[in-house]
Image (tube, grey):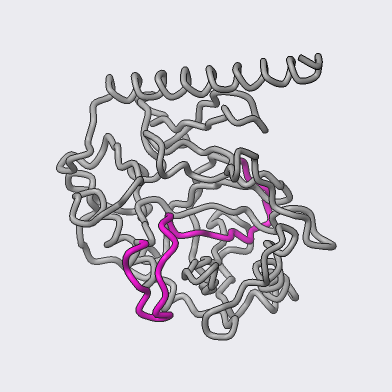
Amino acid sequence: MALYRTEERGRPCLLDYRVFFKNNVAGDYISPFHDIPLKVDSKEENGIPTKKARNDEYENLFNMVVEAPWWTNAKMEIATEEPLNPIKQDVKNGKLRYAANISPHKGYIWNYGALPQTWEDLHQKDKSTNCCRDNDPIDVCEIGSKVLSHGEVIHVKILGILGLSDESETDWELIAINVNDPEASKFHIGDVKKFKPGYLEVTLKWFRVYKVPEGKPENQFAFNGEFKNKAFALEVIKSTHECWKALLMKKCNGGAINCTNVQVCDSPFHCTQDETRSLVESVSFSLNKESDEEDAEQVWYFLGK
């Protein structure tokens, strides 16, 4: 049985749409950013995974939260600044954002998402690129053969990583595969070209030009667009996990990041289940009210009032 399930609030493709997460056993609301463990095999002490001996199999096994499934266009993402961090569609200048179709492909060319309990600290320069980080959980491109659903939590095997220079920030893009994929056991970053010829080249092109339709210049890459190996990727994940722990323990400035959680008991942002239910209801009420007001404005507009 899956450990987590989702609850939709609002209406898809509208500003009020949110996907909240619940623990599937107790049915309690949780944050996909803070309460889902980073490691599949992690043993937790007060919510923070403890150090333990791991073999190679478990060293490379992580939870991934799927935000935007393969072939979709809506730019869905974990709402890092909202209580309990539901998934929502990104908004810019009051308008919902969509990923452009990069010919000949439609929308996202992998299942796109993030690793929980990671954070790319905006105030900390990346030691590999000497650029600031992008203030989000670390991104994942899952290249398996199955089209997943947004809000799905899967186990992934890390293959490698690409460093994207996104508007003077380092934005790391992990390349991973669902461990339940029939071909997962034979994949390493060097094998992608063999088993999925052209896929890494297309991925590089996609990240280079995906903002061009918005009127922005092409993106640049760290290491001249070279995909770094698993060992490099694991070091980046470790670093972003340490940043997340500092964030949850209020040892650094998270700015507008919302750190409300139910699992990290020692965190000053820890809350009870009663409080989480109230948070979800208050967020949903506020969003529904805003949506109703927008609908009314549209009606008056079309009536010529």
* Nearer to the camera, 67 or 169: 169
Task: Please state the extent of the stretch shown in magenta in the rendering.
Answer: 122-149
Q: Residue at x 19, y 50 (%)?
A: 249
Residue 219 visible in the displayed image? yes
Does residue 207 sit above or below 9 in this rendering? below
Which residue is the extreme one toward the left?
A: 266
* Nearer to the camera, 285 or 189: 285
Residue 202 placement: quadrant: bottom right
Side of 179 where 57 appears, left or right: left
Side of 299 where 82 appears, left or right: left
Does residue 137 sit above or below 204 in this rendering? above
Side of 106 where 41 appears, left or right: left
Q: Residue at x 47, y 17 (%)?
A: 285
Does the magenta run of residues contain 130?
Answer: yes
* Nearer to the camera, 31 or 88: 88
Which quadrant, please, contains the C terminus? top right
* Nearer to the camera, 143 or 304: 304
Does residue 229 sit above or below 47 in this rendering? below
